[in-house]
Every structure is written in structure tokens, then in C-alpha cells.
Image (spheres, rainbow, N blue to C red):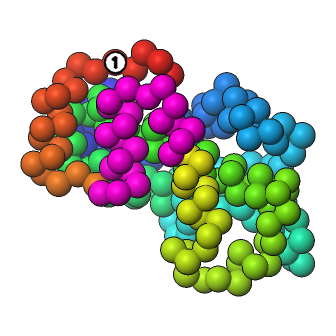
Amino acid sequence: MAFFGGCIDSTQLKTVLKKLLEGDFLIELRHALNIEDVNLPIKIDANIFGSPASCIPNKNKTSLIRVEFLVEPLTKESERLFGRIFDQHLVDIASELFLKFIIAHEFYHVKQFMKLGYSIEDYFSISDYSKRPEEHEANGFAIGYLLKGADDFTKEIINCITNQHFDNDSASVFCDKYKGYCVNTQ
Ligand SMILES: [Zn+2]
């Protein structure tokens, strides 16, 4: 598909997001998390502002009412992470991995609140995202889930998502290394 090099197209990203949420990826993730009996509505929205993904609680913050994904913030974050990779094919694969990471992270929250008895009220009482212990656990799960049997490409992308994004030099090395890379395990 002809996009500008390294660009993330929000319409395409939304299509991939829907595919992941409606297909085998989410079925297998829910199975791995043992939350197959938790049936929360999933909403995909085009909002410009907000978290890329959120668990939305009821008024009393005693339960969750839905899981929400925002296409524009997801697109922006994906651009921040992979915008320097000039090989569009690699950007597309990396963006899909990023979406998988976000979905795994968010559904781990679903497990925390709906299965493990974590307090939704406590969670929302801490406004500093980095100080919420739930976030570290959700990231830890998402990393482990995606790294299971992962190839080097996937490992580098997960490292980019969780530690540092590419600069021009590392992006150039990355593109040379993975020119023509094909996903064969996912
Ligand atoms: Zn989170």
C-alpha cells in the first residue's frame, strides 16, 4: 500500500485493531488470561484526546462497563514509536505488534479488576500513571505474552515499545537488518 514512508494511517490502524479484537488474537488472549467468562463490550472510537486504551468503570467504580480503544491516540503513539522507520512494510508489522501489546495490557487490567479483586477505586485514585502498580503488572504480562516464542524482530519492537523508541541511526540499522522481513509465527 502506498503511504508516505514511515507513516501510520489511522484508517488502516483501525482496520488492524478491529481484526485483532474480533479474531483469534483476542480469543487466545482471553483464554491465556482465563477471562473467557468476562464479556465486556469493546468500543473503538476515533477520539483525538484520551488514553490509547482504557477500562471504563461504572459510576461507583465497583465494576467495569466496557473496554475502549481510541484510534487517534493509538495512531499518534505508533507514529512516535515507529515514525523513523522508513520501510513501510516494517512499520505496518511493528504497528500491529504495538496494537497487540496495548490489547494484552488492557485485558490484563480486565483480569485484575474482574477476577483478581483489584480495587477500581484505588486504581483511579492515583492520577500519576507511572505510580500505579497495576500498570507495571499489565506491562509485565503484555511483554511476556508477546515475547513467548518471539523472533528477533518482535523482541526489538517490544523493546522499542517499552524502553526507547528509534532514533534515525537505530531505525536505519533496523531497516537494513529486516529488509524483506516476513512474519511467520503470528
Ligand atoms: Zn494500563
The residue under the point 70% across, 29% down is 28
Is 141 on the left-hand or right-hand side of 92? Answer: right
The residue under the point 75% across, 65% down is 56
| In the foreground, 119 or 82 | 119
Q: Which residue is mark 1?
A: 182
Q: Quadrant of residue 53?
A: bottom right
Is 160 on the left-hand or right-hand side of 143? Answer: left
Q: Amino acid at mark 1?
A: Cys
Is most of the magenta stretch helix, strand or loop?
A: helix
Q: Quadrant of residue 95?
A: top left
In the rendered image, residue 170, in percent from the top left (x then y), is placed at 15, 46
Vertical relation: 73 (above or below) 24: below
| In the foreground, 114 or 180 | 114
Report helix, strand or loop for mark 1: loop
Q: Quadrant of residue 8?
A: top left
Observer able to see residue 22: no
Q: Which residues fall within the magenta stretch?
A: 143-164
Is 99 on the left-hand or right-hand side of 173? Answer: right
Magenta region includes residue 113: no
- The image quadrant where one finds the N terminus is top left
In the rendered image, residue 17, in percent from the top left (x then y), is placed at 57, 40
| In the foreground, 18 or 26 | 26
In the rendered image, residue 2, in percent from the top left (x then y), is placed at 28, 30
| In the foreground, 138 or 78 | 138
Magenta region includes residue 158: yes
The residue under the point 59% across, 48% down is 141
Is 72 on the left-hand or right-hand side of 80? Answer: right
In the rendered image, residue 16, in percent from the top left (x then y), is placed at 53, 35
Q: Residues within 10 Å of mark 1 (few under 14, many from 20)?
A: few
The residue under the point 33% across, 49% down is 160
